Image: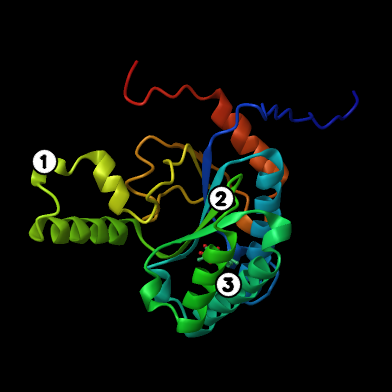
Amino acid sequence: MALFKKKETTNVDFNDLPRHVAIIMDGNGRWAKKRGLPRTAGHAAGAETLRSIATYCKQIGLRYLTVYAFSTENWGRPAEEVGGIMGLLKKYLREAIDQADHNQVKFRFLGDLASLSPELRDLCLRTEEVTRLYEDCQINICLNYGGRDEILHAAQAFAADYAEGRATLDELTEQRMGRYLFTSGVPDPDLVIRPSGEVRISNFLLWQSAYAEFYFTDVLWPDFDRNELHRALAAYQKRSRRFGGV
Ligand code: FPP
C-alpha cells in the first residue's frame, strides 16, 4: 500500500471573502520557548508573520484586517518584554510610514493611545495621517486595547454628550453606540481567528464580535502562514451565518 499523505483541499472562494478578518496573534512566547529563545524573539517572529499575512490579505483583496498587538492587560508583563514589543512597533511603524506609497494600505490604531510613549503615539498618528487616503485595504492595529475599556470610553463619551444636551437617552441606539467605539466606521468582524490552541476571546472586540464566526487553530502565531489563512477562510465559507434568525 502506498503511503500517501492525504492532500488537504482548502478551497477558498476568493470572490466571496469575509469583509473583515480579526486575529488574536497568540503563541509568540511558546514559539520562542520551544526554540530556547527569549520571548522577545517570539514577538519579532510574530511581527514578521503579521507583515507577510497583511501583505497577502491586501493581495487577495481582503478589505479589513484587525490584529491584537497589545492589550490593556499586557502592561503587566515584564518590563523587558513590554519594551521589546514597543520597540518592534516603532520599527514597523517607521517602515509603514516610509513604504506607505508602495504598500497602499490604510492603517488605523484602535485603543487608548494616551498612555503610550509620546514617540510611539506620534508614530501611530503619523502612520494614520500618511496612509489615510488608501481605501482598498485597511489594517487596524489594536494597541493598548481592551474591549471593556473601549465600552467604558464609549459610555463616558455618551454620558458627556447627554450631560451637555447633545443627546437624549432614546438616541442611544446600537448604531450610535458603535460611533463612540474605537472602531467607529469599521464594519464588525466576520471572522475572528485565534491561533495557539487557546479558546477564549481575551477582551478582544467584545461589542463588535457579537455575530462573528470564530476559528481556532493549534498553530502558534509565528508559524501561521497563508495556508493556515486559507484553512480559516475555507472553514468560514462553510459556515451558515444566521445572525439570530433561522
Ligand atoms: C501574544 O503572544 C502576543 C502579544 C501579546 C504581542 C503581539 C505582538 C506582535 C506580534 C509584535 C508587534 C506587532 C506589530 C504590529 C509590529 P504571547 O506572548 O501571549 O504568547 P504565549 O501565549 O505563547 O506566551
Q: Is residue 85 above or below residue 188?
A: below
User: In the image, what residue occupies the spot 26% across and 61% down?
Assistant: 153
Location of residue 22 in the rendering, given as x and y in whole percent from the top left corner? 51, 47
Residue placed under numbered mark 2 in the picture: 138
Q: Residue furthest right?
A: 2
Q: Mark 3: is the Cβ under 8 angstroms from ligand 1? A: yes
Location of residue 100 in the rendering, given as x and y in whole percent from the top left corner? 67, 62
Of the numbered discs 2 and 1, the one sitting upstream in the chain is 2
Q: Which mark is residue 11?
A: none
Identified by mark 3, the residue type is Leu
Residue placed under numbered mark 1 in the picture: 170
User: In the image, what residue occupies the spot 52% across and 63% down?
Assistant: 128
Instruction: Give residue 235's quadrant in the image.
Output: top right
User: In the image, what residue occupies the spot 37% across and 75% down?
Assistant: 114
- Does residue 84 appear to the left or right of 185 in the view shown? right
Q: Could you give the CA–CA distance between mark 1 and mark 3, rounded to whole angstroms? A: 41 Å
Of the numbered discs 2 and 3, the one sitting upstream in the chain is 3
Q: Secondary structure at mark 3?
A: helix
Of the numbered discs 1 and 3, the one sitting upstream in the chain is 3
- Does residue 40 appear to the left or right of 173 in the view shown? right
Crowdedness of circle 3 by 10 Å Cα count: few (<14), some, many (20+)? Answer: many
Residue placed under numbered mark 3 in the picture: 89
Q: Quadrant of the C terminus?
A: top left
Location of residue 236 in the rendering, given as x and y in whole percent from the top left corner? 55, 31
Q: Is residue 224 visible?
A: no
Identified by mark 2, the residue type is Gln
